Amino acid sequence: MPELPEVQTIIDGVTTELMGKEIRSLDCFHPGTVIRDPELPEEVFPAEFISSRRRGKYIILNFSGDLSVIVHLRMTGKLVADSSQEGPVNHERACFMLSGSSKLRFIDIRTFGKIILCKTKNLGKFMPDLGMEPLADEFDARYLEKILKNRKAPIKTLMLDQKLIAGLGNIYVNEILYRSKLNPTVPGGEIPLSKLKILAKETKEVLREAISKNGTSISDFRNVDNKTGEFQKFLRVYQKETCPKGHPVSRIKQAQRSTYFCPVCQK
Ligand SMILES: [Zn+2]
């Protein structure tokens, strides 16, 4: 499942692809993939690309005519740029036809992904409540202290809660907790401020490193140009047998997700 670094990598690729272009039309091949704001006029295309940004794991694209497009990749969604004239490929659920006869295909095996077309002024209505962006300057030990106060749930589970921190998923939370030397089962409210400082710092470092490596390709993550990310080469505990210090890595289930951690390094 794409997490913050993968979504950012896709946005960077999509932005390069869309720059100076307009969307001519959007074809939909799977009912339910495309959701439309009822306030939009019937004809929204052609629409000229203006800008892009990320919020949590959501891609937000801004177009002329007060049009915004939210793309949520969920489990298996991919945006793939393609200049071939071929019709829909396997698992293609929707396709943006662009000026210059290129395409942006939305391919999604599991069909949980969504493309939402809405008026830019209505963006808030179509976005869920999300916590702070972990790469924001304000994301620090004090913010963590505030959101974790009195929380008895394990830190691993709390960090995956999108309402507390936006964009983290299972791979990166495992890696962040390893680098922070924090046991994933410790209740969030019991972590001292000194350790929260390390946790905030390692969160940013892991995410920045992963973005610089174009994300992690464990299952089928691909960038817009169908290239894989490289961060899987730098993982320290996720799906590993031993940690970098040679200790055996433990695997447990927390909230239905696999947790990998080193019981020696992460006391
Ligand atoms: Zn270890």
Image (cartoon, rainbow, N blue to C red):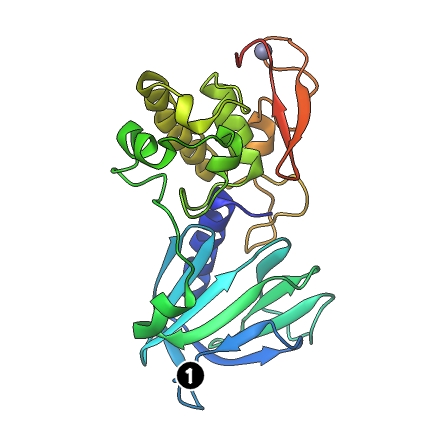
In the image, is residue 167 above or below residue 48? above
Label 1 CB sits under 8 Å from any ligand 1 atom:
no
Residue drawn at x 37%, y 47% is: 131
Q: Position of residue 150 (x, y in %)?
A: 38, 30
In the image, is residue 6 above or below residue 25? above
Residue drawn at x 55%, y 29% is: 174
Residue drawn at x 56%, y 57% is: 73
Asked if residue 28 lies left or right of residue 160, the reply is: right
Asked if residue 250 lies left or right of residue 200, the reply is: right
Going by the numbered disc 1, the residue's amino acid type is Pro
Q: Nearer the viewer, residue 165 or 3?
A: 165
Q: Position of residue 232 (x, y in %)?
A: 60, 32
Q: Is any atom of residue 230 visible in this view?
A: no
Q: Position of residue 190 (x, y in %)?
A: 41, 22
Q: Nearer the viewer, residue 97 or 29?
A: 29
Residue located beneath label 1 in the image: 46
Figure quadrant of residue 107: bottom right
Q: Position of residue 241 (x, y in %)?
A: 70, 19
In the image, is residue 93 above or below residue 25? above
Under tag 1, what secondary structure? loop
Q: Nearer the viewer, residue 160 or 89?
A: 160
Figure quadrant of residue 151: top left
